[in-house]
Amino acid sequence: MSTPLQTVVQVQDAAIQVELYMSIELSDKKWQLTLSDGRRGPSRYSVEAGDTGAVAQCIAKAKERCKLQPQAKVHSCYEAGRDGWWLHRWLVEQGIDNIVIDSASIEVNRHARRAKTDRLDGDKLLTMLLRHRTGERVWSVLHEPSAEDEDARRTHRELARLAKERTAHTNRISSLLVLHNVRPRIIIGGRDWGRWWDNHCEQVPPALRAEIERESARLALVKQQVKALEVARLQELADGKQPLVAQLIRLRAIGPKGAWILVKELFGWRRFSNRRELAGCLGLAPTPYASGDSQIEQGISKAGNKRARALLVELSWSWLRLQPASDLSQWFNKRFAAGGKRMRRVGIVALARRLVIALWRYLEHGEIPNGAVLKPTTA
């Protein structure tokens, strides 16, 4: 019985050049490498995670087994994951044609129970790589950011995590105080917190008091780190190092935080040919279901950048409030404002798609959204 890989090779052998194809199944401890030239069964190797020297040796062994020249071209692929882009960059430096795949786009058996092992996954990836090389569209390939663009995303992502941590600390302190019916009327961790706590700390038992003080110390550290990151970000804007962010901020309803995230996650390094590519990147593309007499609209795909998508929905509400005379706000008010809560929630997502297209055109071509107002310039 022939394997799926051999079946693909038999059908598409005429289109496959004599080159080496490799799939890499990543994990924390071991990597599963599956290699073939498309003419014979695959070679499988297991190496320690992160051992690039072992990967190079496996490629050399596979070339020797397949009787390929040492300089034969190698095509490889792996699924996007926690390893990020360093492996892709290393493979490219070795002259390997590598692609990074969106895991959610890989086709799978739809039976309720299916066998899944690293070996089967590696064989599946290799089979699909061969199909991809013959021109068949079998998955979604991710675009690589430069090392600088990838690093530039760290600031706002760390700020988002710190904001959640800050909220967790304040909620924890509040919950501990309520255990003894102590309910502060001030902001926990705020300017007056230290004086208030000195006056009320005797109302709780010693062990609980010590726990709250430790929690307060962690909250103070988080707030200190948030302030340092925000000051550094504002300094970059003041020094003129972020022209795209400064351009977005000129629009009323968009502040430094939102502009920074949109540029670093989307507009700063991604290039789009049309509005459909832009909407697809954000997961704002429609997903119709049409089968026989069934015609259902399933809503947006949500397959794109969730940080930018969530931010755009928030910005859309601000846009309605601060840009009421714009064409976008007029369109929303005409179509959805008179409806119920559900219709307005549906409409705000549609407005988010239109808004991001308008912002893209504004940054690319300088086209101010129709009816939008710019913030007054300061001397």
Image: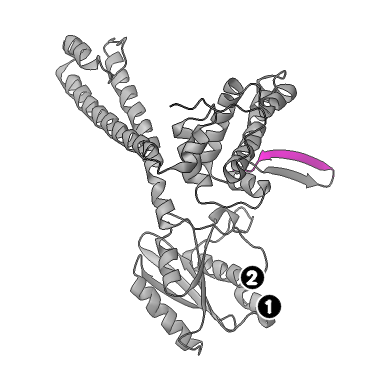
Q: Residues within 10 Å of mark 2 (few under 14, many from 20)?
A: some
Q: Between 367 and 228, which is closer to the camera in this rendering?
A: 367
Measuring from the top left, give residue 277's x and y in whole percent. 64, 50
Which residue is found at the position 32% from the left and 23% from the top? 170
Q: Is residue 202 magenta?
A: no
Measuring from the top left, give residue 63's x and y in whole percent. 47, 85
Measuring from the top left, give residue 346's x and y in whole percent. 67, 29
The residue wearing badge 2 is 131
Q: Relative to 238, does residue 146 appear above or below in the rendering?
A: below
Which residue is found at the position 51% from the left and 87% from the top? 66
Q: Residues within 10 Å of mark 1 (few under 14, many from 20)?
A: some
Q: Relative to 262, does residue 127 appear above or below in the rendering?
A: below
The quadrant of the picture occupied by the C terminus is: top left
Which residue is found at the position 27% from the left and 28% from the top? 219
Residue 339 visible in this rendered orientation of the protein: yes
Tell whether 328 sits left or right of 40: right
Q: Quadrant of residue 199?
A: top left
Tell whether 230 sits left or right of 286: left
Measuring from the top left, give residue 172's x and y in whole percent. 31, 24
Q: Is residue 299 magenta?
A: yes
The residue wearing badge 1 is 12
Secondary structure found at label 2 = helix
- For the record, the magenta segment spans 293-302
Q: Relative to 128, does residue 368 appear above or below in the rendering?
A: above
Q: Amino acid at mark 2?
A: Arg
